[in-house]
Amino acid sequence: MQGGPRITRRGYVAGLAGAALLERCAHRAPRRETQVAVVRLREYSQSIYDEVRRLIATFRLEVRGKRVVLKPNLVEYDPAAPINTHPAFVHAVLEAFRGLEPAEVRIAEGPGHRRGTLDLADAAGYFATIPRFEDLFTDLNLDEVAPVSLPNPHSKLRSLYLPKTILAADLIVSLPKMKTHHWVGATLSMKNFFGLVPGGVYGWPKNILHWAGIDECIADLYTLAPKTFAIVDGIVGMEGNGPIQGTAKAAGVLVAGHDLAAVDATCCRIMAIDPEQIGYLRLASQNGAARVVQTGETPESCRTPFQLLPEHSHLRLG
Amino acid sequence: MIHASQLASMQNRDGGWGYRGGSPSVTEPTCFALLALAAAGWGTATAAGVDWLKRRQRADGGWPPRDEVDQSTWVSALPLLLPPKLKEPLNIPRAVEWVSAQSGRESGWLYRLRLLLAGFGSDPQNANPGWPWYPGTAAWVAPTALTLLALEKIQREQPSKALEERCQGGRAYLRVRRCADGGWNHGSTRALGYDGPSYPETTGLALLALHGSPIPAQSMDMARRHYREARSMEALSWLTLGLAAHGEKAPPPADAPYPPRTTLDLALAVVAAAAPERGNIFLE
């Protein structure tokens, strides 16, 4: 699709179907609508800058004078494998948000396994692609922190230390790679928030989240960051034994929206994964699922079945 | 050229070091900076640094990772690595007590009994108690290796049977957490039937912690390969120290070393550079 996303009748109907999917496992009736946009984009070429700018423009984000934090997914040193969020995509999002005249746009990440975040970003191509990257970047693992209470947690956590860069942000933009995940089925914009938890306090990996329940912690982190936006890098994702050892899968899409659960449910449908089978999406919907207004392409028209591990065959969308 | 003076110039007015120049002082880079300055024979700046640590030692004997955190964590092992004279002002017996009492949750009898009752059998990886990053969680390679090095130092200073037993357990933990490729990663060797690959930095650190123990040729090969392909100063430093601990001088890297990004990187590079002439401070 050229010229950015628009609401189509087909898209709206698909969106309602998607909303119904989430609503079925919700305890309360939906109270709000949320837009999720899907656009086709087949490669990380120069056109990504225009496409991302048009995509973000459809959401009419009010960030003038605000502090925006872009949160990509940086995992491993391998620049060739589709493990990390692509640097050209992150740069395109950075430029698009700069055009909206915020007070500041920072890029921030706290990888889960490797301590050398800047070295990792360098190896992943961020220094080469994003001018003055080091000045724009905050290593969330080493940032100053403050305690935050979890009033009604799904997990066993009652409080959590979080980086001050995140707590001071007016908008956190989750920029994950579209990948399968060997523990939770799919890692998308919600799971990407594991990178908000500071390794400098909890270690590498952030094992406290595993003991407290992975799905439950993903759902809890989603509630801790109320001002969010997400754009999922599904141009080339990862299938099979994700999030590190899988293989490249070109889905050729970007998926965007304010409601991370709705964005992730849409991504699952594109990946031919049943969102109802994803534990953290079920938990997130308990807080009241939004009615999804699908714009641009429909998930069905972009469906690209991602190969699943045999242990995850039950996740396959029928 | 890495020099201890760079590290000294990054010291904050309060005596500590932050992760990067100008950032607030925190426990880990302060300990590593002090260790590196001592390794390089740099006498100035250390008293203020130790005083910074002394003021932050908690009543339970441990240290928090940073002032905002109300919990002693794995960083409590790091002051124990300092030379005896330097750590004199600290309450070392209390610190040793706190560190010795920590172990990975997966090696506790309750967790192992639960696994057994759930039909998962007994996992030999859980038999040996390593050390966690954060109390109440599982043990991992990096905190186990660093705590092992720290407690060995204490053991050399004041031998005790209990400490030796913990050290033996730590070494056994590291041996069973070796990846199929011979190196070490963060501590997860296999997930859902798939072998996990090792990392350069944890391979170097584990080799260092296993000094004096026989190391399979495959592990040394993997360390050499990681050294050739390392992309960080941290990895190069740990691998230099780890290989040297097993009698092998690391060959010069193929490309120019990566710049030190953090105080930790710089401190490790100073320690690694000082080791051939002045000795490896982790093992003294």
Image (cartoon, coloured by chain):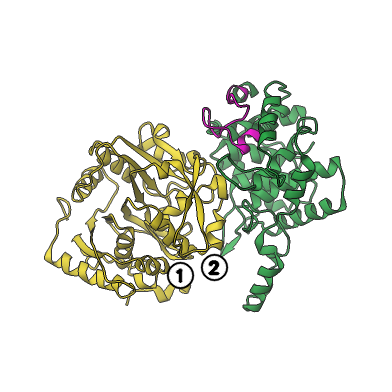
Residue positioned most to the left: A9
- What residue appears at the point 55 percent right and 44 percent down from the top-left corner? A200
Question: In the image shown, does A134 or B138 lie closer to the viewer?
Answer: B138
| Quarter residue B180 falls in | bottom right
- Which stretch did the figure color magenta? B8-32
Queried whether the magenta region covers residue B27, the answer comes back as: yes
Chain B image colour: green
Judging from the image, mark 1 belongs to the subunit labelled: A
x then y, percent, for residue B282 = 74, 38
Q: Is residue B172 left or right of residue A155?
A: right
Q: Main secondary structure of the magenta part?
A: loop
Q: Which residue in the protein does label 1 denote?
A: A309
Same chain letter for marks 1 and 2: no
The answer to whether residue A41 is visible is: yes
| Quarter residue B111 falls in | bottom right
Q: Is residue B68 left or right of residue A260?
A: right
- What residue appears at the point 38 percent right and 70 percent down from the top-left corner? A282
x then y, percent, for residue A315 = 39, 73
Q: Which residue in the protein does label 2 denote?
A: B192
Residue flagged by tag 1: what amino acid is it?
Answer: Leu
Do tag 1 and tag 2 residues touch (Cβ < 8 Å)?
Answer: yes
Q: Is residue A158 above or below residue B116?
A: above
Residue flagged by tag 2: what amino acid is it?
Answer: Leu
Question: In the image shown, does B246 or B189 lie closer to the viewer?
Answer: B189
Question: In the image shown, does B248 or B28 lie closer to the viewer?
Answer: B28
Q: Is residue B50 left or right of residue B254?
A: right
Which element type, helix, strand or loop, lies under badge 1?
A: loop
Queried whether the magenta region covers residue A283, the answer comes back as: no
